[in-house]
Amino acid sequence: MPKKLVVGNWKLNGSLAANEVLLGGCGTLAGVEMAVCVPFPYLAQAASLLDGMALGAQTVSEFQSGAYTGEVSAEMLAEMGCRYVIVGHSERRALFGEDDAMVGRKAAAALRAELVPIVCVGESLAEREAGRVMEVIGRQLGAVWESIGKEGFSRAVIAYEPVWAIGTGRAASAGEAQEVHAGIRRWLSEREVPLAEIRILYGGSVNAGNAAALFAMPDVDGGLIGGASLVAEEFIAVCRATMTNGGC
Ligand code: 13P
């Protein structure tokens, strides 16, 4: 089993001064892999301050180079020291028009530059209430499959982020998360993706209080953390929670 992975997604937050305080207070823990996905302008600063934590970005262009004003390529992210990049976050899907196929092309771009894509999937509240959770997630994963296939999925991280849990203070229960994570693992296993190294993260209102129960689930391999990653003590407490209740 690979180590559990906890990734902070800072979203549109930070300043040079605040980042220095936050990263200075984080440190690392043995037994858990930690990463932070920061806004593009802070990649260089974060790369210089990180000591053992991995660096990531929050999105990437599907294009490698050329006349694409405002875009940032996977190769640029790799050159800045990134290991991870989030693709298909529900905020990108809902607010910036990213569709399933584009998420697949972005995952492929990440892999081309030897970055690890963190492929986000998750249902809305209406979709959950209609009993369509695995149908929606199967559609989202299927579109990525079209672009990266078995070999690509074996190098990717998947993040289950139910839209209704993001930034709401209402995390999925450990049981709800486990059920979907097991469904995602089943989806991968049906397509013969080697499961031993695959990590499926849970994201959505994870905090120091609920992290241990979520991470104790057998198919929850870590977390993608928004708000709680912006305060060093809280982020460290979430990371530490991977090591209780049977975590690594
Ligand atoms: P919150 O932890 O703030 O709910 O955000 C989750 C998220 O969107 C991480 O990508």
Image (cartoon, rainbow, N blue to C red):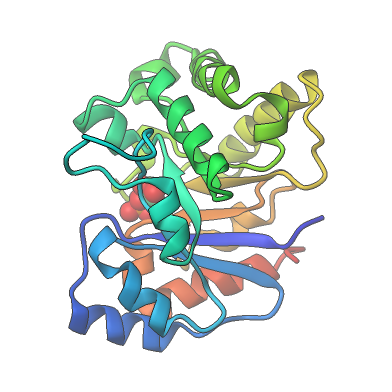
**Left or right of residue 75: residue 72:** left
Q: What residue lies at 50% left-to-right and 85% top-to-bottom? A: 27
Q: Pick out the residue farthest to the front.
A: 66
Quadrant of the snapshot with the C terminus: bottom right
Using the image as rendered, state which of residue 47 and residue 58 is in the foreground: 47
Task: Name the residue rendered at 53%, 74% in the picture.
Answer: 53
**Is 49 located above or below residue 128 in the figure?**
below
User: Can you tell which quarter of the image residue 69 is in?
Assistant: top left
Position of residue 18 measured from the top left corner of the image (x, y, whole percent)? 22, 80
Asked which quadrant contains residue 41, the reply is bottom left
Q: Give above or below for 161 relative to 4.
A: above
Instruction: Identify which residue, 43 or 166, lies in the foreground.
Output: 43
Q: Is residue 204 visible?
A: no
Residue visible at 55% across and 40% down?
Answer: 112
Observer-nearest residue: 61 or 56? 61
Tell me if residue 18 comes above or below residue 169 in the rendering. Answer: below
Residue 19 at what x, y percent from top left? 27, 78
Quadrant of res 245: bottom right
Can residue 33 be seen by looking at this rendering?
A: yes
Image coordinates of residue 13 in percent, x first then y, are 21, 63
Residue at 62% in and 68% down? 33
Counting the numbered discs, the total is: 0
Q: Is 203 left or right of 10, judged from the image as shown? A: right
What percent of the width, then of the height, locates residue 224? 47, 53
Direction from residue 153 to residue 94 in the image, left or right: left
**In this view of the protein, which residue sits in the foreground, 216 or 229?**
229
Q: Quadrant of the N terminus?
A: bottom right
